[in-house]
Amino acid sequence: MSERISREELVKIYNIEVTFFDELVDSGLLHIETENEIRYLMYEDLPSFERFANWHYDLEINLPGLEVIDDMLKKMEDLKQKNRELMNKLSAISDKYEEG
């Protein structure tokens, strides 16, 4: 089983509101596991949770703002990946042209 932390532990450790955590889950920004009616966040998702909590509590960004920022960052990463792929293809074409 993967390492995980319960919602209740997160609330205590990070001093956040339970409703904030639940809103992140309900909006699809966080994905959880539920076992015996206890909600768990996987350790691998902690960086995302911490980022959202920092943006919300430190920068006072509301949930819709978090959703927009998260979506834009994902789109930027997709574009970066596509750009790398295109650059690799261009490099391969260029190499073939120089050989020929």
Image (cartoon, rainbow, N blue to C red):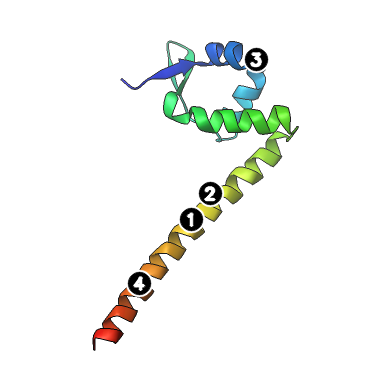
The CA distance from mark 1 to mark 3 is 33 Å
Q: From the top left corner, tell me how far across and down residue 51 is, in percent.
A: 59, 33
Residue denoted by label 1? 78
Q: Residues within 10 Å of mark 1 (few under 14, many from 20)?
A: few
Task: Looking at the picture, tell me which residue is in the foreground, 53 or 37.
Answer: 53
Residue denoted by label 2? 74
Task: Looking at the picture, tell me which residue is in the foreground, 29 or 60.
Answer: 60
View extreme (bottom): residue: 100
Image position of 43 (left or right of 14)? left
Image position of 34 (left or right of 58)? left
**Mark earlier in primary sequence (4, 2):** 2
Q: From the top left corner, tell me how far across and down residue 92 is, in percent.
A: 31, 74
Q: From the top left corner, tell me how far across and down residue 41 is, in percent.
A: 47, 23
The quarter of the displayed image where residue 86 is located: bottom left
Q: Element under label 1? A: helix
Tags 2 and 3 touching, CB below 8 Å: no
- Amino acid of disc 2: Lys
Q: Residue at x 47, y 30 (%)?
A: 45
Q: Residue at x 59, y 43 (%)?
A: 70
**Mark earlier in primary sequence (4, 1):** 1
